[in-house]
Each structure stands twice: as structure tokens, then as C-alpha cells.
Amino acid sequence: MNELLLVFATIQEAKPFIEITDAKSNRKRPFIHTATDENTSILITGIGVFNASIRLTEYLSTQPLPSLVVNVGLAGSFGLIQGQWYKASAISYYDSKTHYTDIICREEKYAHLHTVNTPADKVKMAENPNWMYDMEAYGLFASARYFLNHHQFQIFKYISDRDGTLVSIKNSLSGYTDLCPMVWSGVKQLFQKIMSFKNDESTMHSFRDKFEVFCTKNRLSFSQKNLLMERLTYLKNLGFKEVVDTLLQKSYREFTDRDRRFAEILNELNKYE
Amino acid sequence: MNKKVIYIENTLVENEYAAVVKKIHPEHIEFIDSYKDVLNQKGGNWRFQKNYQSIILAKRRDTFFYKASPLTQVIESKNFYYNTLAINCLFDCEYCYLQGMFTTPHLVLFLNNQDFICETRKLSSSLGEPFYMAISYDTDLPALEHWYPYCSEWIDYAASDPNITIEIRSKSGLKSHFSTKKPLKNVILSWSISPNEILSAYEHSTPSLEHRIKAINHAISQGWRVMLCIDPIIKIKGYQEIYSRFIKYITQIIDLKKIYGFSIGTFRMHTNYLNNIRAQRPESSLLWYPYERNHQHAGYPENEKKKLIQLVKFELEQIGVTKIFEYE
Ligand code: SF4
């Protein structure tokens, strides 16, 4: 059960979170770490938009889907406050379609995040001084969108530098590490929000699963299935959940003719409307 | 509502949006090419986003009004128009078609209201006869008045154009959009009202019936033309009793002799919208009712529809209401 996935470009960015969550690396796949509570995983993608996209796609298509993916890391900005954390309000990548994130945190600061292929220098960053620049976010978003809803992908960036030089970035790491526990508590709060919403959805999923089994078992046609879905959901929502559950456990295969079978099912339901 | 980040179209210049931004006071502004980039973004969860609804400030470039569609009401005028000065709503009615019309619930405010008025003025001179314009369409306009004075500007316009009759429909309990103005014959203030049983079950985050009634009585006392809308009438358990009790109740607290008219209709919706909304609201008994589908419109079967309409109509006629506009 890896419900929360934290994604980093480098081990340096991931390290404070590996420590906080007491995560252990996977022997066969060292870029994946699993926390001791087994609820949180850490993925290190490597630098750059393509590495990010490939590693995350691979992860999401082979592992159980997490409820929340959070990218945490460093970003440069000419005008934003250095040493401050920001959440991405939008993610852009050259001429690609900009993605506008769901704004769900009331406590954090927000800024536009632009992903670049090569480190952005002072001149590049000065073009849009209030933007953040990184090298992975758009690639991560491009993968996540195929698997998850928008609100299940979030980004926290620490403003590390305003010139893109390696020295500045390295110098910022201790400040970044100091603030990671604070970000971790923000991530956990976010996770709670997402989970409380997801719990509402999972009730519906279990109903849908039972419904699918019932329709296959009773060999209902496509249109019969649609009609039945409407009637059963209506009844369930009116408060006849037990009636619906009982019906979904029954078999009507004693009626060999499909239309007859369906008529019997509807007859049963008519009693309650 | 999320006021931390707002979106502003690049085509708006600062003095067009500055006043609104000052009122919203966001921490961050995202500048965008078109409101559609955010409003129509796919891949989000409508219901989740409704909890964090954002505001988009935009400029309408074309289509400043529409001729009425078959689902809109037939009022006295044969020239029925509506416009969309804003898109989406602060409230969250379970039966609202807006949930199925746009992929996100974000609120779009068109700040070039004067362009809408200007185009309507042209329409008025080209028609050369009375016409009806519903201006609180695809939104609840009075609820947005504190950000932009839409109603106020339209009431001013109506004062200068005797051909137009504007209707401002709302569920809000606010009075600010009319109380400082002189009542006009060609402005109809209409309120949607429902029995408390319907209101509490399906009209989420809307003002209470008492609030709406206070605003209604205030408008009546000032001499405004007031229309009451019992629409959509919804078939819930014990609906006969619920609606007749409701109509008796409003008779006691609103001077119905002074009401311009009633507009009534049952639940109806475009089938595409209904399908979209059902996916978002799997727990709704209202939306999952086995409606009849005809010509892409879902609604109660004809006999049930008639029953519901007759019930409300009968109760209204009993108390002497004669002007009843019925949804066709
Ligand atoms: S008040 Fe009107 S526009 Fe707003 S949600 Fe309700 S039905 Fe929709």
C-alpha cells in the first residue's frame, strides 16, 4: 500500500525525506525507497524532463497507483525570495500547453513553475522574475496526468538560487534540509485532504465492482446494464442500499432468456419505487 | 473558494481589472491567454475542484447575447434573449446544469460588461420592439455584485432603453444590487425559491429561504417588479404535502398580490450534461432518478411532469395568482 509517492530529481533532494520517513532503498531498484510505515514511497528520477517522465511513467504503470504524488525539490528564480518554499500554480514547458494546478493549500505561497531543458541562468530567469525554474516538473506532470487526477499531483519547490550556478545550488542545500520537516508536515496535511475525498469515491467503486460481476454473471446486454445501473444507483441513493446489495448477490440464470431475466430483475426493483 | 491565486487574461489591461483584484486580494496572479485555458482544462475532478473554486478575470470577445433555447422559459415576450456575463456559480445546487457544461467549476467574470451593454443596445435598435434579456444566466449574478457591479450597470442601462426588459434571477439574499436604485418597470427581480426540504437537500451552500424572503419583501416594498420561480419542482417523498405547505407558507409572509408573476417548471436537463454530472455525483438521488430522455433532454415522464406542474399551479391559483409562466 504505497499511498503517497514523493518524487525527487536527485538523491541530495531526497535525503532529508529518506531520513524523516526512515525509508529503505529497494535492493533491485535503488532509485525507489520505501518508508517503514509502507505507506510512503520515494522515487528518484535523475535530472531532466525525460528522465523524470520515464521514471515516473514506469513507476505508475508497474506499482499500485498512489493517491498522491508530490514532487519536492529545488528551483531557481530571479525575483522570488531565496530560501522560501512555493507551490506551483502552473507548470509550463516552452510552447507546450500550460497546466494549471488545483490550488488546494491555503497556507503555502504559490508561483508559476517553468521547466527547462538546460539549467536556467540569471538572464533567462530575469525574463520572468517571478517564475520558478526547474528541469523536471513538466515531465512528471506529463506522466502523472495519464494515471491520476490533477489534484493528486502536487509540487513543492525551494528557491535555491537566482543564477543557476552549481555553487549557489550546493550552498542552498543546508537551508533546504533544515526546512524539509516543515514541508513534510505540509505534505501530510495535503495527503489527509486527498484521502478524505478519495474515501467518498471508494464506496462507489465497491458498488461498481459488485455491479459488474452481477451483470457478467447474468449476461446482461449493454443497454440493460445502463438501465440497471441507473435504477440501482437511484434506489441506493434513496436509502435502499441493503436491497441493492442483496439483489447484486442473487443470480437470475434460472431464466434462460436474457430479456425475461432482465424483466425479473426490474420486477424485483419495482417493489421499492 | 480559493482567493490565493487568481487568473487574469492577458487581453485585460491593468485598469480594467485593478478594482476587482483589490477586492479579491489574491496572493498570486497567473496571467493566461484565454479563460478557456483554465475553465476547460481536462483531467481534474469537478467535485474536488468545487471546494477550491478559483476566479478567472476575462474579456468576452464575441457572442454578447444568445437567443433562447427550447429549455428556457417562455415569458410574455417573443424576443427572448440571455447573456453570460459570468460563467459558473458560487452556489452548488445539485440540479444545476453548469456542473455538466464545463469541465471545471472555476468562476469566470467577464469584466467588459460595457461591451455587452453596447452590443445589446445595438440589438435593441435593430429589433425596434420590446425584448426580454435574462442577465443572470449560467451564474447567480447578484451574488457576484460585490466583485463587479453587473446588476447595477444593467439597471442603469435599462433606465435608458424602454425596449428592453431585464430579468435578474437569484437565490441570493442580497439587496445591494437594487436597494439603492429607483425601481423600474422594465427590470424584473426574480428569486428562485424552494421548500426547505428541497433547499436543504439539493441547494447546497445557497442562502436560506428566510434570507431570500427578506430580500424579496424588501424589493416589493421598494416597488420593484418581483417574480418568484418555483423551478425546478422536484419529486421527492411526500412532495404533494411539501409543496402545498410551502405555498401556504409563502402566502403568509409575502404579499403575493404585489408579485409580478410566478415561473414554474420541473427538473429538466440536456442528457449530455446529466451524464457528466452523474459521474461526479454518484450519491445523488435527484440526478439518478430514472428520467425519460427525449430529443437529448432528460426530464420526468410526461404524466409525472403534468402532475407536478398541476399541483403547484393549482395551489397558486387557489391563492389568487393568475400570472403563471410555465416552462414548455
Ligand atoms: S444558483 Fe443557479 S446557477 Fe448557481 S448553482 Fe444554483 S442553479 Fe446553478
Image (cartoon, coloured by chain):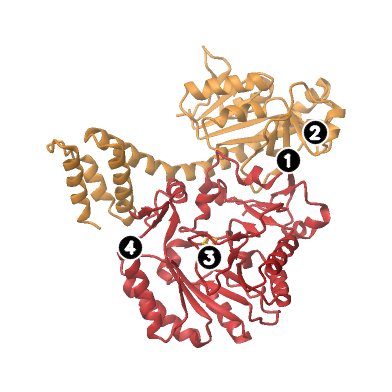
Chain colours: A orange, B red
- Residue kind at label 2, given as amino acid type: Ser
Q: Nearer the viewer, mark 4 or mark 1?
A: 4
Q: Percent x, y for residue A109?
A: 71, 44
**Nearer the observer, A193 or A224:** A224
Q: Which mark is residue B32?
A: none
Q: Chain of mark 2?
A: A
What is the chain identity of the residue bearing mark 4? Answer: B
In terms of image quadrants, where is residue A50?
top right
Find numbered disc 4 in the image and state the secondary structure of the residue it sits on.
Answer: helix
Q: Helix, strand or loop at disc 1? A: strand
- Numbered label attached to residue A111: 1
| Residue at the outermost top position | A28
Whole-angstrom CA distance, mark 2 to mark 3, is 42 Å
Callouts 4 and 1 on one subunit:
no
The tally of labels here is: 4
| Residue tagged 2 | A77
Residue type, numbered disc 3: Thr
Q: Residues within 10 Å of mark 2 (few under 14, many from 20)?
A: many
State whether label 3 is within 8 Å of ligand 1. yes
Kindly report the distance in space between the C-alpha atoms of the residues bearing marks 4 and 2.
Answer: 63 Å
* Residue position marked by numbered label 4 in the rendering: B302
Mark earlier in primary sequence (3, 4): 3
The dot on residue B206 is 3
Q: What type is the residue that disc 4 sits on?
A: Glu
Q: Where residue B143 sits: x, y (%)? A: 62, 66
Residue at the image position 42 percent from the left and 72 percent from the top:
B195
Tag 2 and tag 1, C-beta contact below 8 Å: yes
Question: Rounded to the nearest whole Å, what is the CA distance between mark 3 and mark 4?
Answer: 30 Å
